[in-house]
Image (tube, helix red, strand yellow):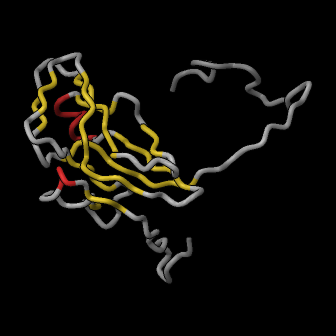
Amino acid sequence: MTTLDHGAPEALAVPVLRLPHARDLDLPTYATAGAAGLDLVAAVDDPVGLAPGTFATVPTGIAVALPPGYEGQVRPRSGLAARQGVTVLNAPGTIDADYRGEVGVILINHGAEPVTIPRGMRIAQFVVAPVVRVTWAPMTRLPETPRGGGGFGSTGVA
């Protein structure tokens, strides 16, 4: 990926298939010029009800062909989480470059009230990101750091 003269990255062309049950829905779009994620919408025929504490997989009506070296991250929408307690259960969900099925969003209602997901509602964000592949370098000892093996909460509180 190259950058344009003003520093913004050039767009990555990603093949997308609009599935028949999403025939009247827009493809995912960026809500603003500076947005990192494209808004995914619910491609449901009938509204999906989420009672408090329940979850459901909501179809988006699209399938994508991400290029090798990239992944799609399915992330929560902050407004939906803040106002209604609805988030993506496996956040971020990963869409691998070799997956060709429909992108689904597993939503969970952590709120106190039932939530209804109607057709076309913006339900999640889709961020395309590069993937770094690793090879393991087995060692008998890891390099030392000031933190060492300190884990959960070991750096204190502000």
In the displayed structure, does residue 131 sit left or right of residue 115? right
Q: Is residue 49 left or right of residue 94?
A: left
| Count of marks placed on residues | 0
Query: 13 or 144: which is nearer to us?
Result: 13
Q: Position of residue 150 (x, y in %)?
A: 69, 19
Quarter the N terminus occupies:
bottom right
Q: In the displayed structure, would residue 50 be above or below residue 42? A: above
Answer left or right for 155 relative to 46: right
Relative vertical location of residue 39 with respect to residue 143 in this rendering, above or below: below
Please name the residue shown 72% across and 44% down the image. Answer: 134
Residue 22, x across and y down, in percent: 18, 53
Towards the viewer: 21 or 29: 21
The part of the image, by quadrant, that contains residue 152 is top right
Extreme-right residue of the structure: 140
Who's the residue at 85% across and 29% down the image? 142
Q: Position of residue 67 (x, y in %)?
A: 52, 60
Residue 104 horizontal side relative to residue 144, left or right: left
Q: Which of these two is toward me, 113 or 28?
A: 28
Residue farthest to the bottom, as pictured = 5
Name the spot of residue 93 as percent of width and height, x first.
42, 37
The structure residue drawn at horizontal position 53% and vertical position 22%, both measured from the top left corner, is 157
Q: Quadrant of residue 86?
A: top left
Question: What residue lies at 19% left-to-right and 60% top-to-bottom?
Answer: 26
